[in-house]
């Protein structure tokens, strides 16, 4: 296989969301700095460890001298996202258009929980629930970017956002020792570059 199997469409959607949520919340007049959200795949672990860590958020700017993306280190701000990748059955017999979902659990553990959850939910909805417009924006955003040494190898077609009915899953959020949370599904279609299709 010519390309790394670590290069997945979810990797690019997560980085886009991380960068754009930071920008949107930074531009909010009530916010002193943007909400930096670390994204983690679902796995066993402790959320408490995060409260002492720094989060690196890509700013979207490119350093002219090096050509590399500029990142900003910000302290953990009480919000994190855990995600699961869900591969779906194709909607049509055409084999090259793939369908996936990303299930996000957004957790808030600090003081302004309600405010942070409302901002994040609204940012995700506004960014990701615009069908082919969202797809076009992510495709344009990804051009020329790298994540580590990975290049974008996916062309997105359509995005939809769903919110699960059990937004307040007391057992999940209680065991995670958080004060607030939200579950959001992002559904998308894409095709991948032929270099990783063969």
Image (cartoon, rainbow, N blue to C red):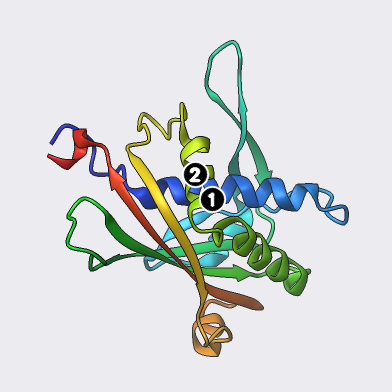
Q: Which residue is mark 1?
A: 133
Q: Secondary structure at mark 1?
A: helix
Task: Tell me: 85 left or right of 67.
Answer: left
Q: Please tell me which residue lies in front, 185 or 11.
A: 185
Query: Where, quadrant-wise, is the N terminus in this rendering?
Result: top left
Task: Tell me: 63 left or right of 35.
Answer: left
Q: Is residue 68 above or below residue 110?
A: above
Query: Where, quadrant-wise, is the C terminus in this rendering?
Result: top left
> In which image quadrant can residue 41 be found?
bottom left
Q: Which residue is mark 2?
A: 136
Image point (26%, 37%), residue name: 193
Q: Secondary structure at mark 2?
A: helix
Cβ–Cβ below 8 Å for labels 1 and 2?
Answer: yes
Counting every numbered tag in the picture gives: 2
Could you say where residue 76 lies in the image, as x and y percent from the top left?
65, 53
The tag on residue 15 is: none
Label 2 Cα crowd, 10 Å radius (few <14 / some 14-19 / many 20+): some
Could you say where residue 34 lies in the image, as x and y percent from the top left?
73, 49
Image point (19%, 56%), residue name: 94
Task: Tell me: 158 left or right of 129.
Answer: left
Image point (55%, 89%), residue name: 170
Q: Please tell me which residue lies in front, 140 or 58.
A: 140
Could you say where residue 85 lies in the image, as x and y percent from the top left?
34, 63
Q: Is residue 77 above or below residue 70?
A: below
Q: Is residue 126 above or below residue 181?
A: above
Task: Tell me: 197 left or right of 102.
Answer: left
């Amino acid at each position: 296989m010519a390309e790394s199997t670590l290069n997945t469409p979810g990797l690019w959607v997560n980085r886009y969301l991380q960068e754009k949520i930071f920008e949107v919340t930074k531009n909010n007049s009530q916010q002193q700095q943007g909400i930096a959200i670390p994204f983690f795949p679902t796995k066993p672990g402790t959320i408490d460890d995060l409260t002492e860590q720094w989060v690196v958020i890509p700013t979207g700017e490119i350093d002219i001298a090096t050509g590399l993306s500029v990142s900003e280190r910000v302290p953990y701000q009480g919000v994190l996202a855990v995600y699961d990748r869900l591969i779906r059955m194709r909607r049509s017999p055409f084999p090259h258009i793939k369908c996936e979902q990303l299930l996000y659990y957004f957790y808030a553990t600090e003081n302004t929980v309600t405010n942070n959850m409302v901002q994040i939910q609204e940012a995700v909805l506004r960014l990701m629930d615009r069908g082919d417009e969202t797809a076009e924006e992510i495709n344009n955003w990804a051009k020329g970017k790298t994540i580590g040494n990975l290049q974008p190898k996916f062309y997105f077609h359509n995005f939809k956002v769903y919110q699960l009915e059990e937004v307040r899953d007391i057992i999940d959020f209680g065991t995670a020792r958080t004060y607030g949370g939200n579950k959001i599904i992002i559904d998308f279609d894409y095709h991948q570059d032929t270099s990783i299709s063969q």
